[in-house]
Amino acid sequence: MTTTVFPLTSNEPDSRTEWLTPQPRPAATYTVKEVAKLLRLSLGGTYQAIRAGEIPAKRIRGRWIVPVTRFHAWLDAQDDDPAGTQLAA
């Protein structure tokens, strides 16, 4: 008598190993180029604002980084139009 054994397989992912898979994390910092793009400023103007302390940033090993949470807190705290440059309707 011959017995054929078939392995049990499933098309579903193995739920036991799902928790082992590392989930991508959002970046904790922005580059100066990313900040310039977000603010629609030139790269040079963004560096000037960072050096002047207008934009929160840290210099690590000669490279400027902008912490995401501090940047967004700073951005939220900015006046909508501090110079009063809005055009009249």
Image: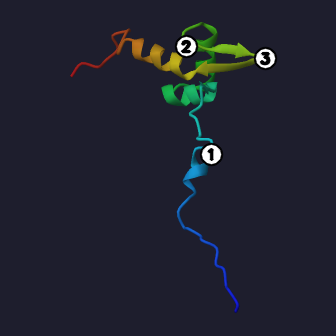
Residue at position x 58%, y 35% in the image: 25
State which quarter of the image contains the N terminus: bottom right
- Figure quadrant of residue 14: bottom right
Q: Along the polypeptide, which appears first: circle 1 or circle 2?
A: 1
Residue annotated with mark 3: 61
Circle 1 SS class: loop
Q: Looking at the image, which is closer to me, 13 or 76?
A: 13
Q: Along the polypeptide, which appears first: circle 1 or circle 3?
A: 1
Q: Residues within 10 Å of mark 3 (few under 14, many from 20)?
A: few
- Figure quadrant of residue 63: top right
Residue at position x 47%, y 13% in the image: 74
| Residue 42, x across and y down, in percent | 57, 26
Given the image, on which type of amino acid does mark 2 rest? Ile
Given the image, on which type of amino acid does mark 1 rest? Thr
Q: Looking at the image, which is closer to me, 14 or 1?
A: 1
Q: CA distance from mark 2 to mark 3?
A: 19 Å
Given the image, on which type of amino acid does mark 3 rest? Arg
Check the image and report above or below for 15 versus 27.
Answer: below
Residue annotated with mark 2: 55
Residue 21, which numbered label?
1
Q: Residues within 10 Å of mark 2 (few under 14, many from 20)?
A: some
The number of numbered badges drawn on the structure is 3
| Residue 30, x across and y down, in percent | 60, 26
Q: CA distance from mark 1 to mark 2?
A: 36 Å
